[in-house]
Image: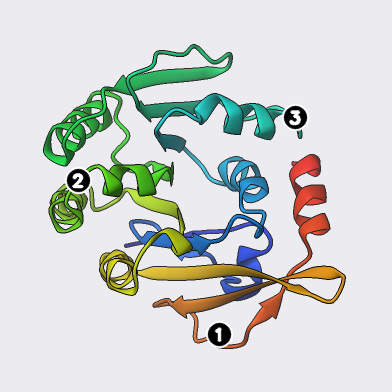
Amino acid sequence: MAGMIPLPYPFSTLLPEGVAKGEVMLVEADSMSGVEHMIGPLIRSVEKPVFVEIGDRTVIKLSAMQKFGPLPEVMLIRVSNIDVNIEGCTVERIPSGDPTSVLSQFYSIVMERSLQDAVFVVCGIEQALFASRISEALKEFASIKRSLQDATFIGFVDYRAFSVRTLALLESVSTTVVRFESAVEGDSIVRRTYLIKSPHSLFSEVVEYDLKRVIESAKKD
């Protein structure tokens, strides 16, 4: 893996150098952590971004991102049984199905579109895993990743939706793992992030981050 991919705030507080090209980064979060505001800046900050959405909420998420400013020309791969057209996006749809079929079609799209070195930002992993055997899905993904050594994957999951064992399996196929947590303390919501593992940073402290700053950063990009 050569070269580093810089990451926007608040990822940069833990990973000032970013992640290496070719990595698999897992972002664990809860519903109050505000990660939906981080996806737009992340897509804008990387070269050759591909947004992968599993499920049928793509239009909602992309519309939310576009409110903060135009997105770059972005490729969208949807794993869904619903067709959509989104202005400014090249859309490829993969019908929902078993992991082997979905990942085979995904690989075909990557090769046809010359996306072997793209940065894939993936949302909706929960839906894919709920609909299949987790070990089978991860085995298929690992096989695909070995064939796409220069591709970078940044996947977002709601960690509260999984058991400790399932999270451990997800973390086992990831090179970098970051968690965002939120808690109600008094009259406010306190949001914290910490690094679970990374080959590039030994940062071990828990860092509080400002959601307002995240949103302002999204507006500026």
Q: Is the C-beta separation of discs 3 and 1 under 8 Å?
A: no
What's the residue at 28%, 49% (across, down)? 129
* Residue 198 screen position, x and y as percent: 42, 76
Dot 2 crowding, Cα within 10 Å, few <14, some 14–19, many 20+? few
What's the residue at 13%, 32% (across, down)? 101
Give me the C-alpha separation between circle 2 and circle 1. Answer: 35 Å
Q: Which residue is mark 3?
A: 67
* Residue 119 screen position, x and y as percent: 42, 45
Residue sticking out furthest to the right: 187
Give me the C-alpha separation between circle 3 and circle 2. Answer: 34 Å
Q: Nearer the viewer, residue 35 or 39?
A: 35
Q: Could you tell me the amino acid type at mark 3?
A: Lys
Q: Is the C-beta separation of discs 3 and 2 under 8 Å?
A: no
What's the residue at 46%, 37% (across, down)? 48
Q: Which residue is mark 1?
A: 203
Question: Which circle marks residue 132 in the picture?
Answer: 2
Task: Give the mark nearer the N terminus: 3 vs 2.
Answer: 3
Residue mark closest to the camera, 2 vs 1 = 2
Q: Could you tell me the amino acid type at mark 2?
A: Ser
